[in-house]
Image (cartoon, rainbow, N blue to C red):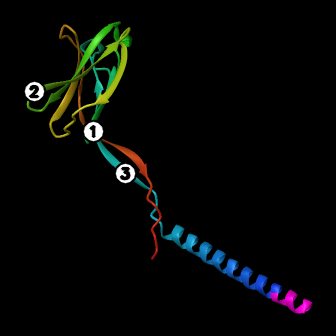
Amino acid sequence: GRARRARIRLGAAAAGLAVVAGFAGWGIGTAVETVTVSSPRTMESEPMLVGDMTADSADGSPIGEVYAHPGSPGWIFVSVDLAGHGSAYTGRVSCVLERSDGTTVRVGDFTVRNGQGHWGAQAPVDADAISGARLTSTDGTVLARAHLQTGHVLTRETHAPSQQT
């Protein structure tokens, strides 16, 4: 009796171990197969309007940058440094987008201190209609402007592993 029960337990343990090992092997095989068939990382290019801000006082040298992203929602980011070109302007400025048909749209205001400032916000950006941007003081004086052109920003995109059925 006792030896027989020990053999049955040993047999049951061996069978259980075989089942566990089988599932482990299947799991590892499936994981390796999934990894080998998964999509590689790709670089995706997003269109964006970009331009260097210039001012008359800067003789065409860049004094800032504008990035405008079309989409839903669109957004714009502006940075400016007038101080390096003799203007220590401090005050509110308006960011105005210029359209190809000559019309404009004010997209926001921000504060420039000692000639320096940056600002970003959601904004309606139509890449086919927008041709430029400008920063104006509260009295309407154009402090800086940029001609915008289409550029591309590369973003890394990963894909979920493919599922085998």
Q: Whole-Å distance between the Cαs marked 3 and 1?
A: 19 Å
How far is disc 2 from disc 1 in space, using C-alphas? 21 Å
For the residue pair 55 and 26, the one nearer the viewer reads as: 26
Res 103 label: 2
- Residue 110 in percent (x, y) is at 31, 17
Residue 73 to residue 135: above or below? below
Mark 2 crowdedness (10 Å alpha carbons): few <14, some 14-19, many ≥20: few
Above or below for 83 versus 123: above
What's the amino acid at mark 2? Answer: Thr
Of 160 and 65, the residue lying toward us: 160
Between the residue at mark 2 and the residue at mark 3, the CA separation in whole angstroms equals 33 Å
Q: Residue furthest front?
A: 1
Tell me the crowding category of disc 3: few under 14, some 14 to 19, or many 20 or more residues within 10 angstroms, Cα based: few
In this rendering, is residue 82 above or below 51? Answer: above
- Determine the main secondary structure of the stretch shown in magenta: helix
Q: Can residue 4 be seen? A: yes
Q: Is residue 4 magenta?
A: yes
Residue at the far left in the pictured view: 101
Q: Earlier in the sequence, mark 2 or mark 1?
A: 1
Q: Quadrant of the N terminus?
A: bottom right
Q: Which mark is residue 73?
A: 1
Asked whether residue 5 is drawn in magenta, I would say: yes
Q: Which residues are magenta?
A: 1-8
Q: Position of residue 151 (x, y in %)?
A: 29, 40
Labels 3 and 1: the sequence-earlier one:
3
Residue 19, image quadrant:
bottom right
Residue 162 location in percent, x, y? 45, 68
Residue at 20%, 28% in the rendered image: 132
Q: To which residue does mark 3 refer?
A: 44
Looking at the picture, tell me which residue is in the foreground, 87 or 17. Answer: 17
